[in-house]
Amino acid sequence: MGTVGLSFGSPTSGAGFNVSSTVAEIVTNLQKVETPWKNQLTSLKSQDTAISSLGTLFSNLSNAMSSLTDFQGIMAQKAGSSSNNSVLQLMSASDSAVAGTYAVTVGSLATTANGYLAAITNSSDTLTGSIVINGKTVDVPSSSGSDTLSGLASAINSASIGVTASVTTDANGSRLSLVSGTSGASGSLSVTSSITDSTTGTSLGYNSNLATGANASITVNGVSYSVASNSVSSVIPGVTFDLLGTTASGAEVDVVIANDNSGVESTVNQFVTDYNSLISAINTQEGDDSSGTPEPLFGSPTLSLLQQQLYGSLNAVSPNGYLNSVSSTAGATLSGSMTIAVGTGSTYTFDVGDGTSSGDTYYTGSGKNTLADLASTINSSAIGVAAVVVTSNGESTLTLTSPTAGSSGALTVTSAITASTPTALSYSDTAGYISSTEDSGTLGTVASSGDTLSGSVTIQVGSGTAQTITLDSSNNTLSGLLSAINGLSGVSAALDQAGTGLTLTSGTAGSTGALTVTSKIYDTSNPTTTTLSYNTASDINNLTSLGVSVNNDGTLTFNSNSLDSVLNSDFSGVTNFFQNSVGWGQTFSNMLTGAGTSSSTGILSLAKSSNSTIESTLNADISREESLISSESSSLTTELNNANETLQQLPSQLSEVNELYSAITSYNQNSNG
């Protein structure tokens, strides 16, 4: 910290000095300690802005990926057409529709039964009698004003017969019209009328000559169908079309259902655009701005992490298929065998266990019975297939990737591999702790009290120190585990009523005795055996196959014609490439979540959180320093005001001293003279 020299002027002048400017100079000097803090804050704020901008770009890219990985997204959309819209008009094609061409002939349209009663001259004439419709009788309303055609129509509509009644009027008079609520043959009407016009004495008979209910008659790809409605949705799965006319003899309408190639290509193009925006923004942060000042994230490890994640995931190879998953924590052991063939090549057998590998048969070796052992054996064989064990959320699976892209490298795999997984002993405390009683929960259960256990359990009482028991040969049974738990502080264990599980009880009531138990105990004597079936993922391994190539600066170039060709020949392969659980698309989407700001553990989120912590500390330091400076300023002002007042009084004090001195010296001279 620099020093401040105070200038009081001539101490005998009586002018004193400027207190406020002197204090301001001292305060300015004191505030210099804050300068590096404020500079660091400014730098961190600039980083926050850059991080937020990158987070937005990550979000944009995630949205584009979601359209491709969503099972109901663009990959599920269908495009369709009709070769004769005057006969058949295509209304919709859902994601369940199968692409193809369907030849449709329409022999007849569906009709809806309808008819009417005889006309009367005056619609307000009084009616009597009843009408029977499909076995249900409706009487003419007896109340005055409702015993007319309109009153009868209202009564029929209220009777819930499945018929709509209305009054129509033309030059010949007014009549009651009946229309079936159901089209096709099942909607036929059976009507008997005994209605009489009391005013004229005319009987109103029923005329059914308008139309009877009949089904439409169509054929689709040579198969005949009788459908009750002219809106057809049950003949071609996922496709709804309306019948508007009939086809001429020998003619047919072609209904073409196609995958939405253009929509997929547009979405992939958007993905490429969003990816390039993100990469360009990251590249920009690696240099200087227009004034030559380093960008906010220049040299930051955050950029390196983002680049590693993006480039690694972008260039990742999508597997052709995978085995069912097994627990990655319970120590699953494998047995059995599987066969693998690439394209039309030879079939190779891989056995779990001991044996001599020769020809087309390979063995994992004695005691080598894990997914990792099986993967290692496949990778060291001569077939060139890449086997990788992927672990996520406590589950592991073996993925297989062909050395050759496309159908010529398609894998044919049969799996008779079985996995034996020890049964987990989970902890359950459904009720939670109650303030008035000790917390209690259950740990179990085993098949037999003598079963061999393995693993560990961690128990914490309230906010106390977590206590861990790791089983070994001295306590690897239920009774041994019971004894070990009873040796811990603040918790006790007892066998449950069945003798196959443990009840854990806290020694303290309320929240201070609440039990937090993490069980990694497994019953190795009672394993669960499952067959690890093989699941086909995709015969497309990488983005390059879809017309997406990487440039030298890390950006992408997209060739829509290349993708269109693949979509026409292998649409399902493209779909699986993006949507399969171990496919490239799902893996890339997970990476975006783990790198951006949408997850609290994302790379950018953690960077921003770290900055926020430092910023809080710096702001607290600055606030504390400002408080000290304010206090010091107040104290200095008081002290310097007092000093200034003293200086201003010096001339008069000196004058008084001088007068006194003169008086004294004059007195002495006179006395000696």
Image (spheres, rainbow, N blue to C red):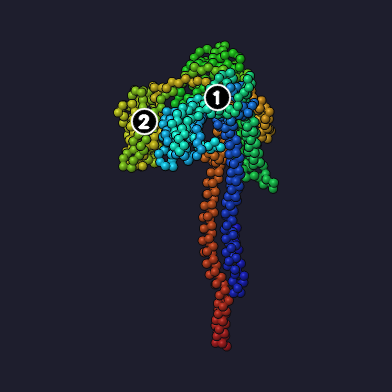
Q: Earlier in the sequence, mark 1 or mark 2?
A: 1
361 sits left or right of 448 in the view: right
Res. 443 mark: 2
The residue carrying pointer 1 sits among few (fewer than 14), some (14 to 19) or many (20 or more) residues within 10 Å by Cα, namely: many
Q: Secondary structure at mark 1?
A: strand
Residue at the disc numbered 1:
216
The residue closer to the viewer here, 619 or 317, is 317
Residue 473 on image: x %, y %: 38, 24
From the top left corner, tell me how far across and down residue 77 is, in percent. 59, 30
**Three-letter residue code for mark 2:** Leu
Q: Is residue 519 left or right of residue 273?
A: left
User: Which one is closest to the eye, mark 1 or mark 2?
Assistant: 1
Task: Count neighbours of disc 2 (C-alpha within 10 A) and say few if under 14, some if 14 to 19, many if 20 or more.
Answer: many
| Residue visible at 63% across and 28% down in the picture | 86
Q: Quadrant of the N terminus?
A: bottom right
Give 440 or 489, whichever is nearer the viewer: 440
Q: Is residue 616 above or below residue 365?
A: below
Judge left or right: residue 452 versus residue 543.
left
Residue at the (56%, 78%) spot, across then down: 652
